[in-house]
Amino acid sequence: MEERQLDPCYGRWYQSFLCNRRYRVRYGEAVSGFCRFANGVPQGSVSGPLLFIIYTDTLSRRLYELHSEVGLNHHLFADDNTLWKSSPDLEVCAIAIQRGLDIVEDWSHEYKIPVSVGKKEGLLFTNSPADRNKLREITLGEEIIVFTPKARLLGVILDTKINFGPHVDKLKSDVGRRLVQMRAIQGSDWGGSSKDGRGLFGAYVLSKLNYGSSAFSPLLSATNMQKLEVLQNRGARIITGCLQTTNIESLLLEANLQPLENLFSMQCAVAAEKCRRLPEYDPLYQTATEKTPPSRLVRTAQSWQQHSDDTLHKHHCRIGRLNSKFKPETLKKAQLADQTIDLRNREPVYRYPSVAPWDTEKVNLVVFKPTLILPCTKDDSDEIRREASEATIDQYRDYGIKAYTDGSVVDKLGAGAGEIRSDPNPAFVLANNDPIVINCAAPGGHLSSSYTAERVALKITLETIRDKSAIIKKDKSLFVASDSQSMISALGKGPLRQTNALNADLWKILLQLVNDKGITQVVIQYVAAHCGIPGNERADALANEALQKYNATKMKADFKKSAIPLGSVKSELKRAIKAEWKNSLNPDKPRYAICGDSYSDLKFSNTLSRQDEVLLHQLRVGECSKMGKFRTRVGIAATPLCRWCNNAEETVLHVFSDCLNLSVIRANLNVPGVTILHTDPELGLKFYREAFAIIDQYEIK
Ligand SMILES: [Zn+2]
């Protein structure tokens, strides 16, 4: 701690915490004598992990010296330590690794942390198996390092060719086991609903498939990728109870899923964008921004950096990476302006709080109120919501400064605005009763969400209050109303728990107001939106006005001044990748004629019995166990012909739309045809039951 130049008081503090610690064992009534801790920290202590990092940081710093000298890289995660070196010359690699291991060996003696026996592995990444024999012996102390064909690192299995084949095989068995467990709680005519199945699949199976995917998925071969898709498809069939022969696209739409490949592409691009938002000294920032080193290993697959670039470029994002293949000058100017999302102004991602804990003394003077004093919900009438809001606002009528903020978003461009009213200096109240009114507005940037626009609105309002001396007078209290409940809840977590720059900035300004500007109390209060509260309506109008102003050609550049949050990039990519997949769907499949490319409503199917729910899924995808084709295949029926008219093949489309012998039931129930399965599933099921009642009668006779 001293080496790290931490305040000596912390060092002394920890010295007293760690030194002369004693322990004893109790068994029933009996108690042993005291023993002294020779080394280590008390188990389960809050600062134990932090102390471990400070302790092992010494190793990291010694290894780091080798980085500049021989280009050796290292990575520490908890008690896992990885050293690696890349070079076309095996001898260069071996020398660098050996020097690193010598440092580890010395350190482990000096710091009394032995390297666990049998947990040391070497892995040589190469295309040529012969290279293995050319590599000289590498040792850690007395022990020779054994080189293996694959090794597990933080839950991902690496192999010598980095094609992640062994990792896919491991996933196959792990996920296969989890699918069997899913199958045990949900059948096609019993058990949990599709909605619950989908929830379980996401939490228990997808999370497993997804772990580390941004690193390994770009390097998967088509065959390996397909192995993983097959696992997901099995899951989709368990969720929906659909048959083995069901068309995959239809199956995924019924289960509210999309190809894994889409999910992986998004994760990969988002991971790269996240890295580019870290501080410049972060190694992840460097790998995500620098030129990818050429590799003789990877032939068909791409590096994760290149893969993420391609995904972002495909969706018109300009990322400004050094070796970017994207050439904006090849686009026509108009295209560039209209289609390109300029990501270069990135909102930083914070890993640590940007406010020092000791600067938050007055944090209690800032209060966030995400609820109203009277109970009311979004679904209540305007009147009820207005009454509840006004009663809440009325509590703060004595506050010297009152502000309303609101954000506005159209076509992914946003703006935020605020109206501030400050009571005149009390000394002049009798002379002049009019409050000072100041309006302010700021652009919310490209890809703005309404959440971002609301935060921009609050930021410009607080900045204006801080900077205009006419508004602020000492000993005044500040009331701010916003209709963004999510923003108020997020900020309410406090200044030390904000992970993005905008929220952190908001807290910085709030603390300035109470620390430096003498504001005695700040209340940020939620009020219901669009229900006729005058201040809120005025702020809304201001935000719309501002948006129009910035959108005027001359001021379009203003949008670029606002940084783009990572969350916005993520939701935009999610939307774009899903839209692209939906555009590529095969319109010849039966489900397309019924539901188009929309997902099935799992919330609705939740209200049906499991049998009905599965029947509905099967009918919509056109593969139903109760219909002709399936019945003949499994030998229940001799012919696939329609049991009602014997004139055409018995398909879902025929029964629901075309069969002449069912036209009376169809007309009686007012069923327009097969689309009823999507537009009014309950009526669709009713038609099905009435049609089948005829057959049941006939078959019983
Ligand atoms: Zn028929």
Image (spheres, helix red, strand yellow):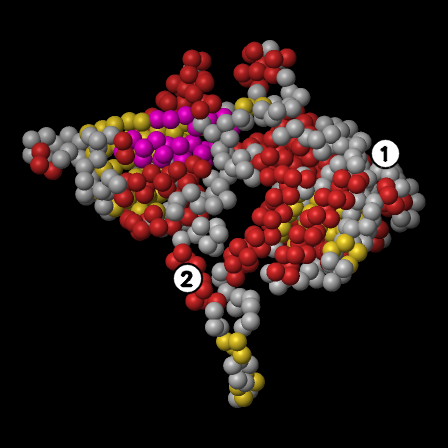
Q: Quadrant of residue 292?
A: top right
Tell me the amino acid under the disc marked 1. Answer: Ala
Q: Nearer the viewer, residue 406 or 376?
A: 406
Q: Is residue 520 left or right of residue 147?
A: left
* Residue most extreme to the bottom: 29
**Helix, strand or loop status at disc 2:** helix
Magenta part of the chain = 441-465
The x, y position of residue 447, in whole percent, is 51, 28
Q: Earlier in the sequence, mark 2 or mark 1?
A: 2
Vertical placement of 127 versus 105: above or below? above
Q: Is residue 299 left or right of residue 555?
A: right
Q: Is residue 180 visible?
A: no
Q: Is residue 14 left or right of residue 417?
A: right
Mark whose residue sits in front, 2 or 1: 2
Tell me the amino acid under the disc marked 2. Answer: Arg
**Helix, strand or loop status at disc 1:** loop
Q: Nearer the viewer, residue 146 or 355?
A: 146
* Residue at which label 2 appears: 12
Q: Is residue 469 visible?
A: yes
Q: Nearer the viewer, residue 470 or 454?
A: 470
Residue beneath the point at 25% across and 37% down: 402
Question: Callout 1: few (<14), some (14-19), or many (20+) C-alpha neighbours within 10 Å?
Answer: some
* Residue at which label 1 appears: 648
Residue 458 located within the stretch drawn in magenta:
yes
Res. 585 mark? none
The x, y position of residue 490, in whole percent, is 43, 45
Residue beneath the point at 29% across and 49% down: 362
Q: Is residue 293 left or right of residue 31?
A: right
Number of numbered callouts drawn = 2
Residue beneath the point at 84% across and 38% down: 127
Vertical placement of 263 versus 5: above or below? above
Q: Quadrant of residue 312?
A: top right
